[in-house]
Amino acid sequence: MADTLTPGAAVNPRRLAHRRKRRLAVVFVLPALLLLGALVVYPVVFSFGRSLFDASGERFVGAGNYAAILHDPATLKAIRNSTIWVVVAPVLLTGLGLMLAVLTEKVRWATAFKLVLFLPMAVSFLAAGIVFRLAYEQDPGRGVLNAVVVGVHDTFGDTAAYPTARAREGQGLTGAAGGPYRTEEAVRPGRSVSLGLVGVAPDAMPADARPAAAAAPGPHEIAGVVYLDFAPGGAGTPGRVDPGEKGLPGMAVEAVRDGRVAATATAAADGSFRFTALADGEYTVRLPAANFAAPYQGVNWLGPALVTPAIIGAYLWVWTGFAMVLIGAGLAAIPRDALEAARMDGATEGQIFRKITVPLLAPVLTVVFVTLVINVMKVFDLVYIIAPGPVQEEANVLATRMWLVSFGGGNDQGLGSALSVVLLLLVVPAMVFNIRRHRRSGA
């Protein structure tokens, strides 16, 4: 493209070349600027304009949608959750990344270790959300975390022997569902009692259960049998031990007098039990509620109290490798002579870490932290996928709340646009800080 020159004007070849370079740069940059304007600038401007109108988009409400944010309990809860995310997740990730980066320098297979930790970054948030939604399932048969928790609990704690068992009505035992059950009539030493229960499935019977048989009491004893009062095929007489009926081994039995437990016993394989050395008087034979307690089902990871920490845990799994790799790169750039000099001066590894390593890594740690803050403010996928419907509101952050208000049933794109503008205003300071820090470091 030729420049128009006035007659007699001197041609400056350098200036002419500079103008040509600028025009060529504009030609190459223009498509990117148009794309940036269409995908970023226009949506921001449109969202701000839309936030000034009501849900229908016809009535101008000014700052009404922004005022509604401060009065909507669900939105305030989303702001609270976003604050928790911003405070907790970047701090934990930066700390974990620093710790792992330092430790990987001291292991033999550092590259393989870093690769394993970085692999979750290759998994989409959708896939990670599905994986952790299954891992957090309440049912120990499906949720791996609760399977581990229940396994540990059952190893160190006693489980109820017969959670589904109940007393047969009108056969001498009284009590509410789930126990405790007690004899309706008082029992004196020298007598025998039969405690018949129902509601135990055949496959739930202990493997060591034997045909029921009552023990014979001595003069200062109360004996009896606790058994499944149900004969195969439905035959037999309720309240009486019939052939084919089995005892309930392991059932705890108590002899109670004047409201206090006078003696305890445990049913044998045939269901028999015996209280010895009892003083003369009247007793009530009781089956404690511990025999019938529901089995431990683990932790309700996706309940209202733990759903946000549980989702943050999934986020940590995905992003820990990112923080570790970036901090590890900064750690590799630290001059080793400074560390060696400190060791020669007698500094401990802890002192070297606190007073040399961390200060030298401060620029890298800042980059990682600010990057994670920006990313956390926009988190959406994990929250939307992992949180079940009944507790979705308890787990919502600003991004999910914005989507739900606009498209997830709220159909109020005015309020949703206001939320998007607020989210943008919260992210911009962190972005500006990151850009300025990058420019200062590159200067």
Image (cartoon, rainbow, N blue to C red):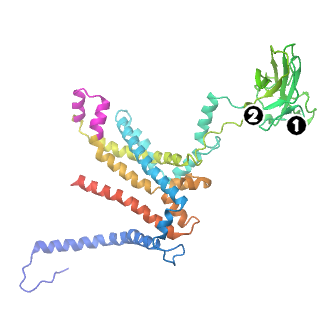
Q: Which residue is mark 2?
A: 292
Looking at the image, which residue is at 32% across and 31% down?
350
Q: Which residues are magenta?
A: 338-358
Looking at the image, which residue is at 75% across and 25% down?
250
Q: Quadrant of the N terminus?
A: bottom left
| Residue 140 horizontal/vertical position (percent) | 64, 40
Residue 258 visible from this viewpoint: yes
Dot 1 amino acid type: Glu
Closer-to-camera residue (206/371): 371
Closer-to-camera residue (206/349): 349
Q: Classify mark 2: residues with Cα within 10 Å, few (<14), some (14-19) or many (20+).
A: many
Residue 287 lies within the magenta run: no
| Residue 101 horizontal/vertical position (percent) | 36, 39
Disc on the earlier residue, 2 or 1: 1
Does the magenta stretch mainly form a helix, a strand or a loop?
A: helix
Closer-to-camera residue (108/164): 164
User: What is the secondary structure assignment of the residue under circle 1?
Assistant: loop
Q: Which residue is mark 1?
A: 169
Disc on res. 319: none
Looking at the image, which residue is at 30% across and 36% down?
354
Residue extending furthest front?
258
Total labels: the figure holds 2
Residue 235 sits above or below residue 442 on the image: above
**In the rendered image, which quarter is residue 269 located in?**
top right
Residue 115 sits above or below residue 14 on the image: above
79 sits to left or right of 2? right
Q: Classify mark 1: residues with Cα within 10 Å, few (<14), some (14-19) or many (20+).
A: some
Q: Quadrant of the C terminus?
A: bottom left
Residue 23 sits above or below residue 319 on the image: below
Q: CA distance from mark 2 to mark 1?
A: 17 Å
